[in-house]
Image: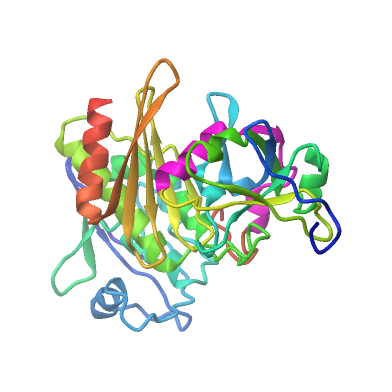
Amino acid sequence: MSENNVERIVITRGHFLFRRIASFEMEIRDGAPYVLSSAFRRAKEESGVSVYVEGIETAEEARSHGSAHHGIAMFSAAVPLENEMPVVHMPVSDAPGHAEIMQVSGDSKKRKLARACSVVIMPTEFPEDRLRSSISLDD
Amino acid sequence: MVASAQSQSVLPLKLQYSDPQNSVVSVEKFRAFKANKGHRRPSSKITDWISTNRTDDQRQFEARKANTDVVVYMALHSVGMMRVGSGTAQLTVDHRVLVNTQLVSAALRRLTKLAALEPNWDDEGAEPPAALAIARASLLLELVNEFLTGFGIGIHPPDTSAPLPNGGIQLEWWSTTTDIESFIEPDGAVHCLFVDKFPSGEETHLESGKIGISAAAEAIASRLRSA
């Protein structure tokens, strides 16, 4: 059991995972949403990559941990597990499905995770909203 | 405000931009600025410094409300294909470069916008793009296109650019057979991931590790040439 009395589970290849994707980390390529590998980078590389376990949380619940600038991508846990990236269930008080992908080191691993992603919820707000309002390039 | 004379191949332009007191910035200040000495915060209006042959691409550099070093640096550096003439503020712009600049304008415009991202743009504590990363990304764009031009093939601006949560910049070039992901870290370090794609959907990856910016540009251009 974890601190908040949520049963910890062992994440296997049969699980699916949700990852919040900031709008800047997503493009449209060949007419379809395309997740950039930057979605699996963090501000500080020593931490794991946060994901949410499907079945414990829904995509909408995973989305609720972020903002309208986030979409949600889903991918098989087999991808990290088969590429030397353990996935550890780490439930927290408001996110019982929270888990972390460990050892996401190197550009190739991040690319593999990104390519495994299917976007299931698109963001509803977009990057321009995050630009400082004092700058206008369109005068 | 700006005088110019035009020939078929070379378009001499005079650079003139104003500080808040409306005084003309000297060539020395310009050079010092390009050398990034002192990180002077210009808060400048870059007004009408190119008055002829104005294009959408050039207009972005007028950036009347620009209030960051980054934007001004971008203005001076990314059109850094320009060379400062000795003793004057006159710049010489190869006409071909102007055309190329238009082709990469969308990428440059996006980089300029990325420079204005606020801290925590991803709601997970992301840093805004570092000025050095923006400048180096701009330089990488220039160098890739210079190599492509040297190879005698067309310009290929990156297909996307994105901020990295640590304050870096990611540029990607895409084709049917290869993808190139390049990363410019906040300290200016560059590394690339070269991806070969196969019809089966499989990929092979080659990580460059940290690499000099010129070597990165040449490798990217070489990949694009053979794609």
Q: Residue at x 47, y 70 (%)?
A: B45
Question: Can you give x and y, in whole percent of width and height, for residue A120 in the image?
Answer: 71, 32
Is residue B223 shown above or below A88? above
Q: Find out whether residue A113 is within the magenta segment.
A: yes
Which residue is situated farthest in the top direction here? B199
What segment carries the magenta color? Answer: A107-130
Answer yes or no: is residue B75 visible: no
Residue B194, how many percent across, how many down?
A: 32, 38
Residue B72 versus residue A51 in the image, above or below? below
Q: Which of the 4 image quadrants contains residue B9?
A: top left
- What's the residue at 58%, 57% (across, down)? A48
Can residue A62 be seen?
yes
Quarter of the image where the C terminus of chain A is located: bottom right
Location of residue A101 in the rendering, given as x and y in whole percent from the top left corner: 59, 49
| Residue A10: in magenta span | no
Q: Quadrant of residue B50?
A: bottom left
Pick out the residue farthest to the right: A5
Q: Quadrant of residue B155?
A: top left
- Above or below: residue B72 compared with residue B217: below
Q: Is residue A15 left or right of residue B100?
A: right
Q: Is residue B103 left or right of residue B121?
A: left
Q: Nearer the viewer, residue A61 or B26?
A: A61
Residue visible at 28% across and 60% down in the picture: B3
**In front here: B86 or A98?**
A98
Up/down of B171 relative to B37, above or below? above
- Residue B110 screen position, x and y as percent: 49, 49
**Which residue shows up at 51% across the image and 48% down it?**
A38
